[in-house]
Amino acid sequence: MAKDRIGSIAALLQRKHADAVGVVEANSLANIETLRRELSMVMYGEANSPACVAWLSRLPIRSSTNHWGSSAAPSARASAAEPQR
C-alpha cells in the first residue's frame, strides 16, 4: 500500500461502511497504523512483512486464518463478533 494512497483507500472503505478489512501483504506497519487511525478501527494480526495479513475492524475479531496455498494470491478468513445493536 503506497503511503500517498492511504487517504483514498480510507475514503473508499468509509463510503462502503466497512466493519472489517483484511489487508494482504501488509508490509508497512506505519501505513497500516495510519489507515487504522483514519478508519477508527482496531488492528489484529501482523504487519511489516509481505507475508502478513493485518485485520482492521470495528468489531472484535474472534479468530483469523491465513491461507498460503499453491496459487499466487494468498487468502485470509476472519470471524468477527456480532455488533451490539
Image: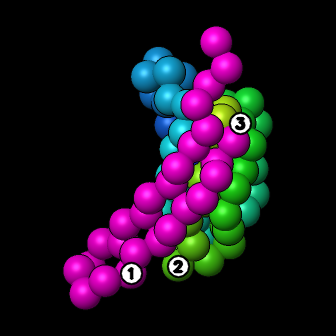
Quarter where residue 7 is shown: top right
Q: Which residue is mark 3?
A: 41
Horizontally, residue 31 falls left or right of residue 1, namely: right
Horizontally, residue 39 falls left or right of residue 24, namely: right
Relative to 50, residue 18 above or below: above
Q: Nearer the viewer, residue 31 or 84?
A: 84
Relative to 47, residue 71 above or below: below
Q: In this figure, which colouring scheme has been used for the structure?
A: rainbow
Q: Is residue 74 visible?
A: yes
- Residue at position x 68%, y 68% from top? 46
Magenta-highlighted residues: 60-85
Within the magenta stretch, is there residue 78? yes
> Given this view, does label 1 or label 2 mark the residue nearer the observer?
1
Q: Nearer the viewer, residue 43 or 8?
A: 43
Q: Amino acid at mark 2?
A: Ala
Residue 81 image point, x, y percent: 61, 38
Q: Which residue is mark 2?
A: 51
Residue 69 image point, x, y percent: 31, 83
Query: Are the two marked residues, 1 and 2, in contact with CB atoms closer than 8 angstroms?
Result: yes
CA–CA distance between discs 1 and 2?
9 Å
Q: Which residue is mark 1?
A: 68
Within the magenta stretch, is there residue 84? yes
